[in-house]
Amino acid sequence: KKSRFFMKSRRLLLLAGIVFPSSVVLVALLSGPTSVPSDPEGLLAPPPIWNLCRRGFHLFVTMAPLVVLTPALLLPERHFPTLRHGFNLASVHALESAGAAFIKWGQWASTRPDLLPTSLCDQLSTLQSGAPRHSYAVTHAEVSRALKAPLSTYFDRFDVDPFASGSIGQVHLAQLQSELVAVKVRHPEVELELQTDFYIMSWAAALVQRLPGLEWFDAQSTVQQFGLTLVAQVALDDEAQHLRQMGHNFRRWRDVKLPRVLFASETVLIETYAPGVPVSQYTTAAGRELLTAAQRHLIVIRGVEIYLKMLLHDNLMHADMHPGNILFDKARSTITLVDTGLVAVLTAGERRNFIGFLQALGDGDGRRAAQCVLGWSVQQVCEDEEGFRRDMGTMFRETCNGYGTGIHLGNVLRAVLELVRHHRVRIGANYMTLVVNALCLEGMARSLVPQYNVIDAAQPLLVAYDKLPRPVFVGLLPLLRVFKTVGDKAARRHAERQQRLGRPLSLRSIGFGRRVVVV
């Protein structure tokens, strides 16, 4: 009996595996996604039918356990923690098995606690790509084709094994004349795989959008935003353009660097090798001891100033500023930003709304902060805006009383996102990029220099930006930068002296509080 039962189950599974992808293809071809972002490269165009069928079957088998456990999301987590934890683990396993696009989506979704439960976001943040690697023969052929010359005649040395690999491409170390360079090569056929997966995601989002009670989730817009990030990462020449622009923006900063682009095509990117260690290796208790107080101070101050410069002056924001993408070279005391495949370019309205939100944090004004957050989407769907303002005001009275009161920015931002999810407030992708970057930098600061307060340090610039006309604010930057450099050197010398004497570092001793920080 058991044998017959399992045979029937296998037949049903096989039948479902055929029917499901076929229905996906049929509906996708008849209706398609209701709105697809513009894509001059054609990445988001309908893929071949065979690819849809093949990927549809694979995804059905991969996602079946996750679908079975989906009702766990409807149960209170505090009463069914084991079931919810099982769903979270199943989500990670399913996405890791589903391929590059779904891994990227999971990593991206982990930064959206405004849409997903915090516990699920935490679990998704552990997603690791299977580090797919293609053969050296593929690398040799692709690099030679891009350079229009044999690889061996272009480089003096080229490592056969990549030193890093991700879902989009892999990176080899090479030597070009006397200079070490990093050569990033896109995986073969990754474009077609991502194109197919995104088309399936778009169909699924259109289906979710029609389910009662889930209209606020804005699944189609969310998938479209993610699709644009895929386009940006697949084209390596776009990443090269971001590198060039950011390098130009920081050209006068002696201790902030970006890799220099030597060659770029759609599939191959050659850039100078960036020395240094990811700051993420220093944020643990053991790693922190590997740095002097002055070095920790430098990393924190520069990290926040880089963020403020991008926000207030450049209008070009690195979209993934976690400590793993910030390298610190102890020998040269320099910071290097890497992995610029994703950037955010803000509109005037987006910048005004987010800076207004930060100013409201500094003033301890919860209702004004709530009004700014409600403006973080062109089409706001929150049904109880007054309730959101009221709850924000209550939360601010308890945890955010303004400048000089020891605001814990990370706790405040997480509380805001929890209220956003509770009240179903829609938030645009660029705003979440700004929030997530702020969370990453605040967490890095608290790990390296616990006394540092991000909001208090940002006060002079936020106030100046608010009070001064734009041309005056920009015109004063060179003069303020001179004062900043002098103050930084004095603060660093004092921090080193305090460390040699074995004295604790106070806020004043390392130039915190209302010290002028400029971009």
Image: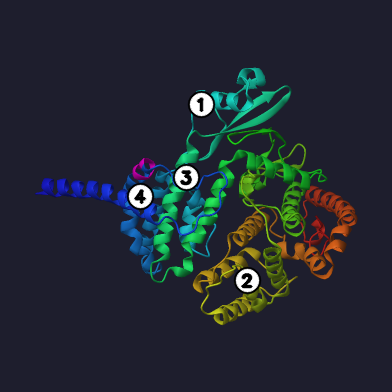
Marks 3 and 2, how far apart at CA: 32 Å
- Specify the farthest residue to the left: 1
Q: Which amino acid type corresponds to the residue marked 1 in the rendered image?
A: Val
State the image coordinates of residue 430 (x, y, percent, origin top left).
62, 59
Q: What is the secondary structure assignment of the residue under circle 4?
A: helix
The residue to which callout 1 is attached is: 138
Mark 4 or mark 2, which is nearer to you? 4
Which class describes the residues within 10 Å of circle 1: few (<14), some (14-19), or many (20+)? some
Q: Do the residues labelled 4 and 2 touch (CB within 8 Å)?
A: no
Marks 1 and 3, how far apart at CA: 21 Å
Instruction: Assign the magenta stretch its main secondary structure.
Output: helix
Image: magenta residue range:
50-54
Residue 340 highlighted magenta (yes or no): no
The residue to which callout 3 is attached is: 195
Marks 4 and 1, how far apart at CA: 32 Å
On residue 25, the disc is 4
Q: What is the secondary structure assignment of the residue under circle 1?
A: helix
Residue 178 in view (yes/no): yes
In the rendered structure, which disc, 4 or 2, sits on the residue that comes first in sequence?
4
Which class describes the residues within 10 Å of circle 4: few (<14), some (14-19), or many (20+)? many
In the rendered structure, which disc, 3 or 2, sits on the residue that comes first in sequence?
3
* Vertical position of residue 371 compared to residue 438: above or below: below
The residue to which callout 2 is attached is: 375
